[in-house]
Image (cartoon, helix red, strand yellow):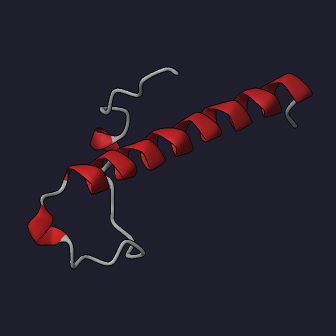
Amino acid sequence: MTNRFERLKMQRRMQRRIRLVVEERRVAFAARDASDQAMDPETTIEITPAAIGRVAVPHI
């Protein structure tokens, strides 16, 4: 059983990972060249664990 602090910490960690993956997908989608415009944005793409966190996220 985890206490409240540990649950909050796990939730924050998971949310941070989700944000990184979403940001990486957004950057990859924006960076692709015009020839790939036929790709369906709703398709699921696999992101390797080694790629997670390698995109610089600007702090606003």
Residue 49 lies in quadrant: top left
Residue in the foreground of this view, choosing between 10 and 23: 23
Q: Is residue 57 above or below residue 24?
A: above
- The residue at the point 90 percent across, 28 percent down is 4
Residue in the foreground of this view, choosing between 5 and 26: 26
- The residue at the point 46 percent across, 49 percent down is 22
- The residue at the point 57 percent across, 34 percent down is 16
- The residue at the point 28 percent across, 52 percent down is 30
Would residue 11 be found to the left or right of residue 47 on screen? Answer: right
Residue in the foreground of this view, choosing between 20 and 30: 30
Given the current orientation, which residue lies at the most extreme front position? 34
Residue 36 lies in quadrant: bottom left
Q: Position of residue 5 (x, y in %)?
A: 84, 23
Q: Position of residue 1 (x, y in %)?
A: 87, 37
Q: Is residue 38 above or below residue 21?
A: below
Q: Position of residue 9 (x, y in %)?
A: 73, 27
